[in-house]
Amino acid sequence: MKEYLLLFRNISGDNSYILTPQDMAEDMPSWQGWIGNIAMQGKLVATQPIEYQGIIINNNGIHEGPDKGENNVLVAGFLICKADSPEEVQAWSKTCPILKYQHGSVEIRPVIPFPIS
């Protein structure tokens, strides 16, 4: 089995996620069910939402974050899972609760294990 990193992206507001506390409370059962399905198969490695504020360090110095890209879209959380194929991860991702939002998306990235010498 291979590990995959799923990055959950959504549009942001000024200094906060665009989601309201009510939206987040209403979405929680959907997220619990979606993540629970992966966990029940023994394929969940880790998952967390992440705070809005962050620090960006690059060659030009240290900057307050988050990195919202060109379209005000940012990473709102992540999930690391194990799967038998990329298609399995794609099938899970097609039912991710983030997709209920117009600008919501799931980016799937295979994890490359460090070689063990």
Image (cartoon, rainbow, N blue to C red):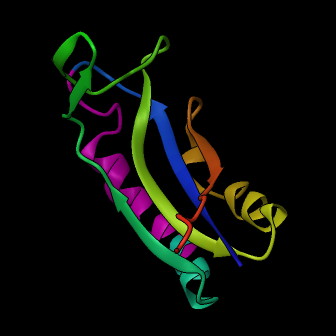
Q: Nearer the viewer, residue 68 or 14?
A: 68
Which residue is pictured at 61% across the width and 45% down the height? 106
Relative to residue 56, is residue 9 depicted above or below?
A: below
Whole-percent x, y for residue 58 in the image = 28, 20
* In this view, 101 is above or below 67: below
Q: Is residue 91 above or below residue 116?
A: above
| Image position of 69 with respect to 26: above or below | above
**In this rendering, would 29 be left or right of 93?**
left
Q: Residue at x 49, y 38 (%)?
A: 9
Write down the region rendered in magenta: 15-34
Q: Is residue 113 magenta?
A: no
Q: Is residue 93 left or right of residue 61?
A: right
Number of marks in the rendered image: 0
Q: What residue is shown at x 72% (from left), y 63% (from top)?
A: 89
| Residue 71 image point, x, y percent | 49, 14
For the N terminus, the quadrant is: bottom right
Q: Is residue 79 left or right of residue 15?
A: right
